[in-house]
Image (tube, rainbow, N blue to C red):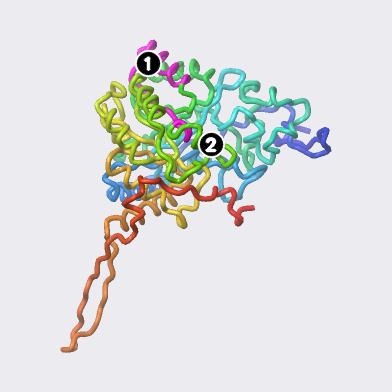
Amino acid sequence: MPSSGLPSQTATATGKAVATPPAPTAERAPARSNLTLDRNDKSTLLRGQGFSDLMRRQTNHRLYLTAHRGMGPTSVFGRTFPEDLPPENSIASIRQAMLQGADAVEVDIFKSGDGRLVVTHDDEIWRNAYDTDRTGQDLPAGETTDSYRIGQKTLAELQRIPIGPNGETMPTLDDVLELAQNVNETLKEAGRRGVILNIELKDKEAIGTLLNFLDSQKAAGRQDCLDNLIFCSFKHEALKTLRAEAKDRGISNLNIVPGIKTAQWFGDAQVDKENGFALRKEDAEYDKQEVEKLRKLVEDYDFQGYDGIIWDFRQDVLDLVSSSAGVPYGAAGLPRQGGTTPGEMVLHASTSDFRQYATDNAFSDVLLKLTEAVETFFKCDNIDDARKTILDSAIRSKGLQAQLLCRPTKDGGVEYRIYNYGHSDDRYYSALTHGAPKPVPFSKLKCIT
């Protein structure tokens, strides 16, 4: 009987049933139809872009929305996740985010054992495989924590492992780029800039393969593809290597942004590692020596700006960006695609596992303050939700709330009056003094099962 391509169940030493990859079959790559757009898709895409334009008009044309792993992380929920969420880093998730009007999409890459660039958040397969123990204690038969990793499996083996309830599997970077290219062709026809792909480099071993791909794009005259790419990583040595080896190959205009952890802004002593790396004190200040190291890193290696968690941003970060404003970060920059100009720094702000935008919009006050001074890419988990909340905060901050009253006059006529309301929340004006409070992670809310 032929294999279905779905995992079978096998018992482990603990007596629990876990998912086991099926016997070898043809790899289950994303259906080609998922990488193209029909008429309805194109209409949805342009409508979503129009909504983002509306948001930008309220934010000095300096705010861009980056879809975090597509429609946000799902591995944070445990073995499974809510049915209405597509699996993170899947074609379904990336496609949905693009159609919502994302300006950019962030994905993570590793290199497979046979040299293919695979889009997934973790090298440890058990962290992303669907309905699998996230601790690595119950692995498929014959696997160990050393063998059950992206770098130890071929692409064919990886694409037999479901990452979602509908049999979704890990896409390749080629798949994601094909989808992005089809989306950008539609946007170009409409006279719009293309969607940017923000690639987080998780695996230093992937650099050579990645540069080979960039070489092929350059040789084919695909400068538009290179302009629509941003590379980021918390592994700064990997970014330094990427910059150096790219220059050796004659690729000098890569847009690279280092990821900054909380301790790299504030110093280790001010971070509570036992409490999700939160700050020990709300009024913690940046560590001047650490910040100087970051400034030197960005300027010495021709990086584009700073990528950090939004709860960590303070007024000091704007001073840091301003001090580097005259330092060019590449030969081309993002003059059209990202809206920035050569020599101008940008910020990338993320929230990770936080989606309750409607009930906690302090993050948007911080974004609005940032965009008064610098162009900012916001990595969010749902483009629609984030955009609505940012628009609401933008309207409040500008005092545009109004009420139309209609009442009869003494002579029997009708009188109309419009009352305008100013911003009454001091939180907006002090948003960068202590930053935005960190809410409860979405996956930890009691309403989520």
**Residue displayed at 56% across by 35% down:** 31
Examine the structure image and report whether residue 239 is included in the region drawn in magenta: yes
Please give the residue where the numbered disc 1 appears in the rendered image: 219
The earlier-in-sequence mark between 2 and 1 is 2
* Disc 2/disc 1 C-alpha distance (Å): 28 Å
Residue nearer the viewer, 264 or 330: 264
Residue 244 spot, x, y in % from top left = 40, 14
Q: Position of residue 102 (x, y in %)?
A: 40, 42
Res. 121 image quadrant: top right
In the image: residue 120, left or right of residue 319: right
Location of mark 2 (residue): 89
Q: Decide: is 163 above or below 326.
A: below
SS state under label 1 = helix
Task: Please state if 431 lies on the left or on the right of 111 as rendered.
Answer: left
The dot on residue 168 is none
- Work out whether 366 lies above or below 307: below
- What is the magenta range? 237-264
